[in-house]
Amino acid sequence: MNSSHNRRPAHWSVAGGSTALLAAMLGLASPASAESTDPIKLTLNDWTGQHISATIMGKVLESKGLSVEYVQADYIAQFAGLASGDLDVAMEIWDTTAKQLVADGVATGKIEDLGGTGMKAREEWWYPSYMKERCPGLPDWTALKSCAEAFSTPETAPKGRYVGGPVAWGGNDEERIAALGLDFEVVHPGTDSIIFAELESAYQRKAPIMIWGYEPHWLNAKYKGEFVEFPPYAPECYTDPAWGINPDATYDCGKPTGMIRKVAWSGVKEQWPTAYDAIKNFQISNAEMSEMVSRVDLKGEDLNTVVDGWIAANSAVWQKW
Amino acid sequence: MQRAALSKPLPAAFWLALAALSLSLAFYAKPLGEALSLEWLVDYPKLWIVPIQSQISAAMHWLIDEASFGLFTLREALRFLSGLMEVPMNLAIEGLATGLLSGTGSRAVEIFPPLSWIAVTVIFAATGHYAKGWALAFVQLACFLYLALFGQWHSAMLTLASIAVTLPFGVAVGLALGIACHTWSGFDRFMRPVLDLMQTVPVFAYLVPILFMFGFGPVSAMIATIIYALPPMIHNTTLALKAVPDELREFGTMVGCTPSQMMRKILLPSALSGLMVGVNQVIMSSLNMVIIASMIGAGGLGYDVLFSLRRLDIGAGMEAGLAIVVLAIALDRLSQALATRHPPARKTTSRAFPLNYPRSFLCVAVIAATWIGGNWIEALQTFPEGWQISTRQYWGELVKAINLNFYDQLEAVKLFFLATLLLPVKGFMLGLPWAWVIGLIALGGYKLGGWRLALLGTMLFGFILLTGQWDYAMISLYLCGVSVLLAILIGAPLGILAAEVKGFSRVMRVAVDTLQTLPTFVYLIPVVMLFNSGDFSALIAVTLYAVVPVIRYTAHGLDQVSPNLIEAGKMIGCSKWQILTKIKLPLAAPHMMLGLSQTIMFALSMLVITALVGTRDLGQQVYTALSQADPGLGLIAGLSVAFIAIVTDRFAAVAAKWLTAGG
Amino acid sequence: MKPAVTKLACRNIWKVFGPGGDRFLRGAAKAPSRDAFTRAGLIVAAEDISLDVIAGQILVIMGLSGSGKSTLVRLMSRLIEPSSGELIFEGKDLRKASEKELIEIRRHKMGMVFQSFALLPHRTVLGNVAFPLEVQGVGKAVHEEKAQEIIRLVGLAGRENCYPRELSGGQQQRVGIARSLISDPHIWFLDEPFSALDPIIRREMQDEFLRLQSEFQKTIVFITHDFEEAIRLADRVAIMKDGRIVQIGTPEELVLAPADDYVRQFTKHVVRAKVVSVRAIMTAPGPDAAYAGSVKATDHIEDIADAVEKAALPFAVQDENGRIIGAVGRRNIVDVLIGREQS
Ligand SMILES: Nc1ncnc2c1ncn2[C@@H]1O[C@H](COP(=O)(O)OP(=O)(O)OP(=O)(O)O)[C@@H](O)[C@H]1O
Ligand SMILES: [Mg+2]
């Protein structure tokens, strides 16, 4: 199993208290000459893919002679650290879950959006393959019209049960259900671990389940299943009722794909110009990421080894960052 | 006024009628309201919600960004403070986990390794031996070997480092404030509601402001932990000081103690056992905060739990979670023993130095030996990976086996509870018109505790109503109410067993410590796998946590009954059962009532967790606020939780007084 | 006889418990009636108390539970503030003493022994006994030596390093006594020091107490509700009821001339022979009577009864100068023993 962070020497702010103290007393960060020798703080959130992105970035920066520090941080809470300059870079901010936080931060000028990572977040209703037998016609969404009951549990019967995302993720699933005339009830767990706990449980029993799935994630590597195919998303679908198959309702389509972007403290550009460029240029594909994530999470390979492999194989790519 | 209201006997018929009326209103208020076009009395109109959310957010931004003392801003001052606190924090982290480094980031070079695993284990075992003897030394040994053996060492040392700084700091501040409360009654009155807020406003509600003010890192985690862990320390300090016998105080005065001598030499030492209850609570609460602390830069075991569960690795999460429990138990037992340690009657000072201080000598020797030896034999410094064992896959398989074989039975249980208990109560709570609920609070408050209580209740619930949190609050109230009820039904018998059956109390104590410090998240995932997300899973989680104070206070209350009274009972010829029901339980009742208030607090503090399994309560509002960067909403929802806690606590207190006085 | 020097004097001391008690008392033109206090929800624990504590004497305060004994000694030591009245200690007004002066007075001039011992549970016997000196800032070497000495004096040598919980009740109170004596107080308050002890140990402790008193000659205020104890120890006894002093006098005066039924209740079961002196029962000496021998006027009946009874003739009673001032015979003694009024 991967637990590289246990073994990697943790890089805490180890300058000893005195530097921190001095900086605090002066109330400002040390003046930036060309490139600061202070470590760049990359956040580590609590999922493997993000660790891989951060570690690749970190190793690349180190190869450019920069000092890097990893800080374990909560996905949401890290925004406060990025805004105040306590943290410097977050490598995977999903539009699907934190668009508002990025927009707010950028608006105050304290956070800078460093653009996409090359990965696209796809999120949509997802079901395990065995449900296909009980609801023929899937993945086309129209099949759901007639077999919602196949997705029901005693609590929701005869309605189907859809395990959506945390309320904070939005998703407009209630509206979608109404607009498309589906007979489903939405449950909103507070965190995605719970979604996958539900899936794991149902999958073990081959019980009916429909969840909010997303990519890149180990979901499709670990379980056999697929996304429901709704009418493809178009921006007008969310704003114009006339658009789409239901002329009276918005949201009569699938969900948009979202960027996964890099976000940084706005002082990074000045303090580490080289790093700033490299981070901005960081690009990786969904396929590459998914492959690495499943090697770590499902095959139990060491994360550092996997990342080193990528670094070795792709030096032409990252040398240019 | 208050006295008059209290002395009037309240006819049971009055309360019964009120209950019946509430019941019928819950079901017929909606149609009735529509018929009379008085819907606004039933469902609070959205238009009337006072939009203070954005003002609060703005005020907070001002506080964080602009508030200034002239020469420097509030934030700079706080940053300076956190810089100061970072010094011991870094020292602890470097000493236990990372080693002393020079340089920063990837340029860091280790100039001195951290204490080796052998050294830390030996130090704790030796301290255990010093404090209480071989038994405790063995407990410490077992705990720390667990951490090493199960590969939790590095994270555990990070967690231990933050506790090692947080604990003395929290205890010192709590002690100082407790003494201040004891000394100045005005300060006490001011602190009481503040403490209630500190204990019940969910940390998530003020996490972001703290991060802005103290910076992202272990210091913020420490501040958040201290805010949460401080109230029990303060409460216990004032209680313990108050409990010092008057004669001791008078004695102090008679020998001419100055106020400071009185405090240092008489009150504090004689209040020690009460103070230690506070210290125990600080330890438990700090370990309870490990998860949240790890989200804001403290790292350690909490982070491992989150990371494992994010991958649905139940076993790894369980092992990391149990490591937290193990750490809690080790620290708790050690601190209790140290505080109650009685030095041996006579010291022999004649022997040569190392023999005179054998334990210190041993520790120094082991530190030196592992440090030097570590350069050649790695195993002396870090526990070799090859020796580690793990049970992780079994946990997952265990859950799977239950899931495959018993899911239907579990589902039947769940549906039974839902149909007979949860859904009816939920329907009832949501069906009640807000105007009626507020009226009830006013009336009940007045009848039970006079106009002050009535005013407090209406004002606090009025806040919830006006800020638009009513429905969320009702769901919270319903979930917590049912959980508290269940917790009492389960916990009271267990507490009695723990007090009555020899040997069971030790088991129970470990179980209770586990329930309190094992991160809920660790068992929430299996619970969701077996029961799906929803109210029933929330009920299980809240009940498991809220049962802690029930068991603890019941057992403690029964233990406190004077043996004389029990002997008296025996001499009258009471059976064991009669002694329990006629002597012990009535005498333990006041203590158990104290537990009730803690149970309510515990239950409400779990609201944030219930939101994880999809309940639409105040906890969910707090989360939503967090992810939408809306500190105003966060604070409002957080305050609503706290207000429910305060009102139910005050009501429970007067109701308890009624019951014990009347019965 | 030495001239009586007043060590501590109470002048019209009042103590009213309850919210606004002091104001209520001060507001009244003349002392309000008991009913008025009760109606105001106040408790009068000390009512207009005036008494002198004579230097070198033992004053015993007696009364039923709740009569205000503890309150009175706590008023004398200013542990509680009187509602009104004056306290003169060694010629100075104690109520005017500042907090600082009070600390000094208590450190060096007052000592107190408590009913439930009030030992510090976290300190050893030695630590407890040395505590007052430690508080005064006396060096460790000095106070430990002094403590050792006084521990020996109360018969606890060898237990210096025990904790209070390892001692019996009697031993614990010895620690309390030793501790209150270590700073050599001028006035010594004891609030029911022996009532938590069993009768045998209590008796032992009383002997111990008398032995110590013969050694130190302290001025003592001693509370008890046991009249036997009072007469064994007291030079004078003050009897309290509902916050008032009903009567104050020597044990003999109380036995022979109780002020009211309340006092009589206390003295009723006393073995009168132990209290009553010859002077109280002697008859006028006959003009030329024959005597079997002589006794002193201050002798207690108990001490002479055997001799008087055996002899057919009465005994002559002499004063301290040896002058014959009366006679005492069998009949006088029988009168005392059976409680018959003197005929
Ligand atoms: N702090 C107080 N507040 C109010 N009332 C008090 C207080 N202390 C004493 N009293 C009352 O004053 C009266 C005298 O009490 P005190 O303790 O002096 O009695 P006591 O003679 O010492 O009795 P005991 O023999 O039981 O010790 C009692 O009625 C008691 O209730
Ligand atoms: Mg008393």
Image (cartoon, coloured by chain):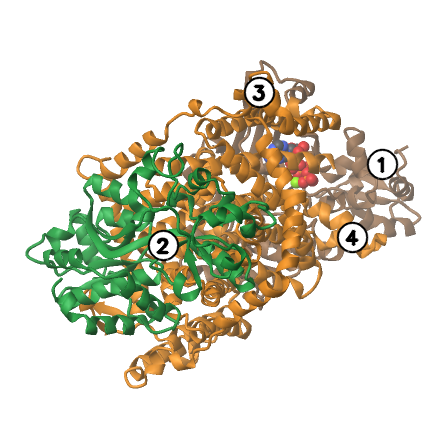
Q: Nearer the viewer, residue B340 or B626?
A: B626
Above or below residue A106? Residue B333 is below
Which of discs 3 and 1 lies nearer the camera? The answer is 3
Chain of the residue displaying label 1: C
Residue at mark 1 to residue at mark 2: CA–CA distance:
100 Å
Instruction: Check disc 4 and report the residue beneath it.
Output: B579
Chain C as rendered: colour = brown
Asked whether the residues under the numbered discs 1 and 4 touch, taking CB atoms below 8 Å apart as contact, a structural biologist would say no
Which of discs 4 and 2 lies nearer the camera? The answer is 2
Instruction: Check disc 3 and report the residue beneath it.
Output: B34
Which amino acid, by three-letter code, is at mark 3? Glu
Q: Nearer the viewer, residue A64 or A283?
A: A283
Instruction: Check disc 2 and report the residue beneath it.
Output: B295
Q: Position of residue B56 (x, y in %)?
A: 34, 32
Quick check: A177 left or right of A253?
right
- Secondary element under disc 4, as helix, strand or loop, is helix
Residue at mark 1 to residue at mark 4: CA–CA distance:
65 Å
Chain drawn in green = A
Which amino acid, by three-letter code, is at mark 2? Met
Residue at mark 3 to residue at mark 2: CA–CA distance:
48 Å
- Going from N to C along the chain, the mark reached first, 4 or 3, is 3
Quarter of the picture holding the N terminus of chain C: top right
Q: Position of residue B160 (x, y in %)?
A: 39, 63
- Of all residues, the one furthest to the top in this rendering is C29
Residue C283 is tagged as 1
